[in-house]
């Protein structure tokens, strides 16, 4: 069970950050889906829910998603559900169930940098940036490989650039973590191929992207791009699958998702 000694319901991001860096044992709360797993004692919990960070808004040519927006909000909001041909809807729709997705937040998801995360894989394909209170705006790809530091995720920023995208995940059962997940995107002549749950964190397959950028997308190149990604990325073993299995499955998921993008054009 989760034990919280003091709950601090902050009224500004400045107060949240000041508390996080100055009060030993303080922790930011998202929807508490992950935090409440196992027995844990939190001395000071920082509650962001009074900061209005649960909104999805259009700002010039970007969509901004507040850190406290629930996964279900993103799945159903008109600005996010249609983005990239509905890729976020596909990535979120398999996570546990609607009640769960109504509670857990995108801020907690991104800050957790979970290697198995489905939305993170899709967000990298969409070229997401994140705005943190202290670090400012950085690309999600850079955030995933940066050393963790005490900070508050404020919002996720997505370009609205007409990109077409697709997501696929392979699971042993409907609500389990993915054995492997893949998101691809085409923006003009540029491609993104992202593979997560390897079981390491989501990573772009750069050689496969370069191959598609040079050769274009058709029924022949989808297969070759999948092979290249399977060869260039590292895959490991965990309780869900072996690295060899993941390497075998990776080209298949990439072929499926690229074919979806090809036909959505
Ligand atoms: C049983 C279960 C099954 C799941 N299955 C899947 C799945 O199949 N696919 C999938 O992609 N995901 C899955 N998840 C992960 C889930 O989707 C969320 O990503 C996860 O619960 C974190 O979101 P949260 O709002 O619950 O964050 P919390 O648990 O509240 O917080 C997570 C971490 O982020 C920090 N944090 C929270 N908000 C912020 C912020 N704004 N700034 C800085 N730090 C912050 C917290 O301090 C904590 O360290 C699962 C989770 C659970 C518990």
Image (cartoon, rainbow, N blue to C red):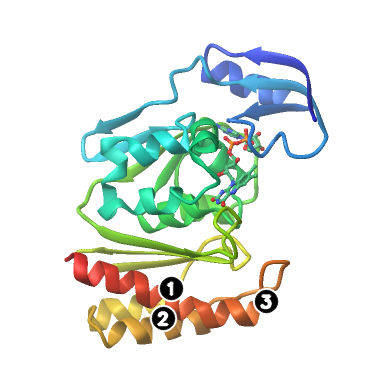
Asked if disc 2 is less than 8 Å from ligand 1, the answer is: no
SS label for mark 3: loop
For residue 69, above or below residue 228: above
Quarter placement of the N terminus = top right
* Residue 201 shown left or right of residue 159 in the figure: right
Instruction: In this rendered view, identify the residue nearer to me: 79 or 158.
Output: 79
Residue at 66%, 72% in the rendered image: 241
Q: Earlier in the sequence, mark 2 or mark 1?
A: 2
Q: CA distance from mark 2 to mark 3?
A: 19 Å
Q: Horizontal and vertical percent for residue 9?
A: 61, 13
Residue on which the image places disc 1: 253
| Mark linked to residue 242 | 3
For residue 3, above or below residue 197: above
Would you identify the image quadrant in which residue 255 lies?
bottom left
| Mark linked to residue 143 | none
Residue at 40%, 33% in the rendered image: 73
Mark 2 crowdedness (10 Å alpha carbons): few <14, some 14-19, many ≥20: many
Residue on which the image places disc 2: 226
């Amino acid at each position: 069970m989760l034990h919280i000694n003091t709950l601090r319901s902050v009224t500004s991001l400045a107060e949240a950050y000041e508390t996080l860096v100055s009060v030993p044992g303080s922790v930011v709360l998202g929807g508490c889906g992950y935090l409440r797993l196992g027995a844990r004692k939190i001395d000071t919990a920082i509650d962001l829910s009074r900061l209005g960070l649960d909104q999805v808004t259009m700002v010039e040519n970007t969509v901004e998603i507040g850190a406290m927006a629930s996964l279900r909000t993103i799945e159903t909001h008109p600005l996010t559900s249609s983005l990239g041909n509905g890729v976020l809807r596909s990535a979120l729709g398999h996570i546990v169930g609607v009640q769960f997705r109504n509670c857990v937040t995108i801020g907690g998801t991104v800050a957790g940098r979970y290697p198995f995360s489905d939305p993170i894989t899709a967000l990298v394909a969409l070229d997401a940036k994140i705005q943190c209170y202290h670090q400012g705006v950085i690309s999600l790809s850079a955030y995933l490989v940066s050393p963790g530091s005490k900070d508050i995720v404020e919002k996720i920023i997505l370009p609205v650039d007409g990109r077409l995208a697709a997501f696929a995940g392979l699971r042993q059962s409907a609500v389990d973590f993915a054995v492997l997940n893949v998101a691809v995107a085409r923006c003009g002549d540029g491609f993104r191929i992202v593979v997560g749950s390897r079981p390491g964190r989501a990573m772009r397959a750069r050689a496969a992207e370069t191959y598609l950028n040079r050769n274009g997308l058709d029924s022949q190149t989808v297969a070759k791009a999948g092979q290249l990604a399977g060869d260039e990325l590292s895959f490991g073993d965990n309780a869900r699958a072996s690295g060899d299995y993941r390497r075998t499955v990776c080209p298949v998921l990439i072929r499926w998702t690229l074919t979806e993008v090809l036909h959505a054009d």
